[in-house]
Amino acid sequence: MSKRLLKSGIIVSGMTLLSRVLGLLRDVVIAHLIGAGAVADVFLFANRIPNFLRRLFAEGAFSQAFVPVLAEYQKSGDLNKTREFIGKVSGTLGGLVSIVTILAMLGSPIVVALFGMGWFTDWLNNGPDAHKFEQASLLLKITFPYLWFITFVALSGAVLNSIGKFGVMSFSPVLLNIAMIATALFLAPQMDNPDLALAIGIFLGGLLQFLFQIPFMKQAGLLVKPKWAWHDEGVTKIRKLMLPALFGVSVSQINLLLDTVIASFLMTGSISWLYYSDRLLEFPLGLFGIAISTVILPTLSRHHVNRQDNSVQSALDFRNTMDWGVRMILLLGVPAAVGIAVLAKPMLLTLFMRGSFTLHDVHAASYSLWAFNAGLLSFMLIKIFANGYYARQDTKTPVKIGVIAMVSNMGFNVLAIPFGYVGLAMASAMSATLNACLLYRGLAKAEVYRFSHKSALFLAKVFAASVLMGTALSYYTPGIEQWASMTFLMRVHWLAWLIVLAVLVYGGMLILLGIRKSAFIAGKFEETTAI
């Protein structure tokens, strides 16, 4: 079991790594082009809406609702029945999203007024930020069609993942990054407003991802004609699962949008600093958290579907798969959090400090990065724990937990007002931690998954190795003044050397502490007493 998961995880992580590297390169180009001022705030605001929808559909609610139902159809072995089901889902979902996209494009000023209330207030009162409201409304008309494209990308990606073709969906975001980098380098210099060129890049990136999926769906024999079927049994089941999942699995993203609303009232640069720090955090989150979550969901769904044939063995396999996911998150997430804590300023400086992005922006973004980083492990574990519910077609429990987490985030935001934009990041981290704890408690109460004593010992070893790694990094890392005085190539050289050092120290300590590869590729995990 876990050997296959490990192989799939490596494929997804490899493709995700390529996507994240290009994503960082994209952000480097954007930072050089528009910096962290008013223009950047407007573009990043317009980018956050479709980016939120990408996470919601491609990595969130739709996949969580669709994959378990698809597993039931695939178990029947009737390909024609499965094809018909896919056609009905794509036609129904596509029709609804088409209406939403058109309405959002026509009503983009309303969307901006909702999520950029500070700018809208200035526009009403002819304030200094009135132009931000007008420009954001224009950019959203261009970026919102991304929703339409990414909906079908999410559908085809979920289908391909269910038959073991994980690389296609994992590679798709690379095309978005390529499109945005190309428009930034070649189209933006030809335009008076560089943010308009970047918005066009988002549109083209969505189109390329949509077209990229088609040949693979055709090759798998699953490219079918969409058909409206609102009352179809399978579509109805997905609707019932998806509506609460839209909220439950995406609480952290909704919190980020609420942060955007508040940040629109703060000093110029706040949205940009939050964006750049969030982008760095997204690197390990996407590379490890989302990749592992993507791989285990189809497996968990199959174990749940097979429970009728052998309920005891299926429950054990389900628990083992969950345990595999949690251990992989701990193995990769703990050192990632420690590394980011130590190298926050060097990474921001190396990646973004050029052109319009100054040393002041590096310092400002590092504070929010540290605050976000406190919740990195929680953000990752949410992805795994949520699958424990969605694979069993339970969407109500995560919704209840999501409501608690979101309301708590609002309370944390109020308490964090004196800390400005950094307080918003702190509130998000605390909300994520609460969300993860409640999700785990629910799984434990339902006897679905419990953290074992063996896993607790594993965590202790990982934590010890990570602390030693962080100490070594802190000792050898130059001061920020030295980083600022280096050339770009020198910064890259130093950063690469420090990352290699971190891998060597962490890996060496794991070996000394007795952790071996067999712990992650064994066919079955040992049954241990749960905590």
Image: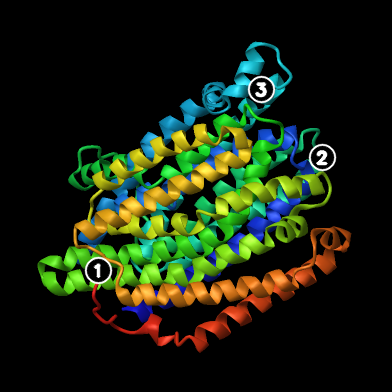
Q: CA distance from mark 2 to mark 3?
A: 22 Å
Question: For this rendering, which residue is in front, 47 or 269?
Answer: 269
Q: Mark 2 touching mark 3, by CB under 8 A?
A: no
Secondary structure beneath label 3:
helix
Find residue 470 and report its horizontal and vertical position in percent: 62, 70
Secondary structure beneath label 1:
helix
Visible residue check, residue 67: no
Question: For this rendering, which residue is in front, 90 or 443?
Answer: 443
Label 1 neighbour load within 10 Å: few <14, some 14-19, many 20+: many
**Residue 134, which numbered label?**
3
Q: In screen coordinates, is 205 left or right of 298?
A: right
Using the rendered view, name the quadrant where residue 317 is placed: bottom left
Find residue 304 and report its horizontal and vertical position in percent: 20, 63
Count of marks placed on residues: 3
Q: Quadrant of the N terminus?
A: bottom left
Name the residue furthest top.
Answer: 125
Find residue 320 and report its horizontal and vertical position in percent: 28, 73
Disc 3 residue type (three-letter)? Glu
Looking at the picture, the colour scheme in use is rainbow
Disc 1 residue type (three-letter)? Phe
Label 3 neighbour load within 10 Å: few <14, some 14-19, many 20+: some
Secondary structure beneath label 2:
helix
Q: CA distance from mark 1 to mark 2?
A: 55 Å
**Residue 198, which numbered label?**
none
Q: Earlier in the sequence, mark 1 or mark 2?
A: 2
Find residue 333 and report its horizontal and vertical position in percent: 50, 66
Using the rendered view, name the quadrant where residue 426 is placed: top right
Q: Residue at x 28, y 65 (%)?
A: 300
Disc 2 residue type (three-letter)? Gln
Q: Which residue is mark 1?
A: 318
Q: Which residue is mark 2?
A: 190
